[in-house]
Image (cartoon, helix red, strand yellow):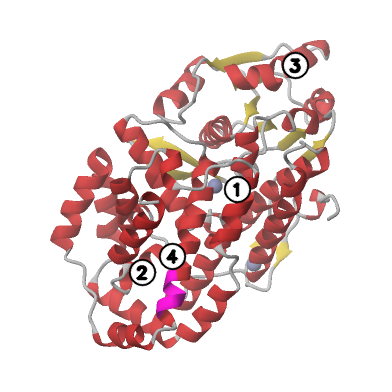
């Protein structure tokens, strides 16, 4: 696959067949060897005078220090804000640190890092109307080009609107030296698109949610780029690293075209967000975002495989057509309080606005699903087998089971049942709830993953 010419995607109105005009407001995307050498020039061309570098102790070693020296050499006097955290959590405290310490006359936030640093800086950029650029230190997640920032606020994982970077700079010499688990996490974040695109199609079919086939195709290209790169990743081949990074950026562009994370985040992300919240609430180890998404992808694919098997079984079709699925909402609220602890309030609030679990909504969705079961079966058959995705992860020595990410059996079962309640976004987790199958599938998967 050839290198991507990002200029084709940026700063132009795309009048799409979906009826919308898509546009991505990033000026420059530079993924090449020695890209760092061009940073001072990019600042100069765009008229920035007072950059503030935001980094942490890891990204300072990887690139931050070098960026600082290059800017000083070019006549700048950059401010530097460095997080001392070993594992930075993008929460209120982290936001406050940047805002408190940043000079008032800063005219550009220069984030040096990946997931959390990128999310913090793009959110601050949006809130303070202050431009930002990202110097990527790892191809570890797809948020570089997106206009959303998942943050931890009030103990919950919430996706906020955020600014687009003016520039994304990825120096292949730096990206290829990223820890292998971070590179594998980037692969995982993109593999998740198999589940998320399927969820989107499913939602369009069942709930008539808006869909854009051109953006789906763009995200498909991102998957292809990443799958093509995986073979040579272990040797840190620069072309393979570039392919992963380009796939991640294309996926982010897909989100910015739509204006939210729908093209890149489905049930696999809800599972990942849920597991992260549990780790935060209970003080457990926090895994990389993409690592959890990869595991969520295996779970999502297994759920689709289970659904396909039962859809092909006439006795199930009969049962689903004749039985009424109803959620006991008193019990549901009790369960939400049990599993979400301090974050239960926002989950219950969301339900009171969306009514996604109302009996009438479930009945309607279930009936539509049953009418379209043949279409659904054909689509599921086109998904890659969960085993094939697990093999890719194993080849990269990446984690592929929930327990490997510190998720215990009970949290795993709860996540299949309640991760969907974090968002009002239809996907496989809500579909199996609508069919009354969520509990059984959760227990079967737990047996598969935990009772080996
Ligand atoms: Zn479109
Ligand atoms: Zn993601």
- Which label lies toward us, 3 or 2? 2
Q: Quadrant of ligand 1?
A: bottom right
- Which label lies toward us, 3 or 1? 1
Give the residue displayed 35% in from the left and 56% down from the top.
447
Tell which circle, 3 or 1, labels the residue nearer the N-terminal end. 3
Asked if residue 196 lies left or right of residue 20, the reply is: left
Give the residue displayed 56% in from the left and 80% down from the top.
378
Above or below residue 351? Residue 143 is above
Tell which circle, 3 or 4, labels the residue nearer the N-terminal end. 3
Residue 63 position, x and y percent, is: 71, 21
Task: Please name the residue that numbered disc 1 is placed on.
Answer: 393
Task: Please name the residue that numbered disc 3 is placed on.
Answer: 66
Residue 329 quadrant: bottom left
Residue 375 position, x and y percent, is: 52, 83
**Circle on res. 432:** 2
Cα distance between the residues tagged 3 and 2: 50 Å
Give the SS element for disc 4: helix
């Amino acid at each position: 696959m050839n290198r991507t010419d990002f200029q084709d995607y940026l700063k132009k109105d795309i009048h799409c067949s979906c009826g919308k005009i898509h546009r991505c407001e990033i000026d420059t995307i530079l993924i090449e060897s020695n890209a760092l050498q061009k940073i001072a020039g990019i600042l100069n061309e765009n008229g920035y005078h007072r950059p503030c570098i935001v980094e942490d102790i890891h990204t300072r070693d990887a690139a931050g220090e070098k960026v600082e020296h290059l800017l000083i050499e070019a006549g700048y006097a950059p401010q530097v804000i460095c997080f001392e955290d070993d594992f930075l959590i993008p929460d209120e405290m982290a936001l406050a640190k940047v805002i408190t310490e940043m000079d008032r006359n800063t005219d550009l936030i220069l984030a040096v890092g990946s997931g959390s640093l990128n999310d913090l800086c793009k959110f601050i950029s949006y809130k303070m109307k202050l431009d930002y650029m990202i110097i990527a230190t790892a191809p570890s997640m797809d948020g570089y080009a997106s206009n959303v920032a998942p943050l931890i606020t009030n103990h919950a994982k919430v996706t906020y609107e955020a600014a687009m970077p003016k520039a994304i700079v990825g120096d292949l010499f730096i990206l290829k030296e990223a820890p292998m688990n971070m590179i594998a996490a980037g692969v995982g974040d993109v593999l998740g698109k198999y589940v998320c695109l399927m969820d989107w199609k499913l939602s369009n079919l069942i709930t008539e949610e808006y869909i854009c086939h051109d953006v789906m195709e763009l995200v498909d290209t991102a998957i292809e780029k990443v799958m093509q790169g995986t073979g040579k990743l272990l040797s840190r081949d620069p072309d393979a690293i570039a392919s992963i990074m380009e796939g991640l950026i294309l996926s982010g562009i897909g989100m910015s075209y739509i204006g939210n994370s729908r093209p890149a985040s489905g049930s696999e992300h809800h599972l990942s967000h849920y597991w992260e919240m549990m780790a935060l609430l209970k003080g457990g180890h926090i895994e990389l975002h993409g690592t959890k998404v990869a595991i969520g992808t295996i779970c999502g694919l297994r759920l689709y495989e289970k659904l396909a098997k039962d859809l092909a079984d006439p006795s199930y079709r009969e049962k689903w057509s004749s039985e009424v699925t109803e959620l006991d909402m008193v019990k549901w609220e009790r369960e939400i309080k049990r599993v979400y602890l301090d974050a239960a309030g926002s989950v219950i609030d969301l339900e009171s606005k969306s009514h996604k679990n109302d009996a009438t909504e479930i009945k309607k969705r279930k009936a539509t699903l049953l009418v379209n079961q043949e279409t659904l079966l054909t689509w599921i058959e086109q998904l890659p087998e969960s085993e094939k995705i697990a093999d890719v992860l194993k080849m990269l020595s990446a984690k592929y089971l929930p327990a490997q990410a510190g998720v215990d059996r009970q949290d795993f079962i709860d996540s299949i049942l309640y991760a969907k309640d974090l968002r009002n976004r239809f996907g496989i987790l809500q579909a199996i709830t609508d069919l009354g199958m969520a509990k059984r599938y959760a227990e079967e998967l737990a047996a598969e993953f935990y009772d080996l």
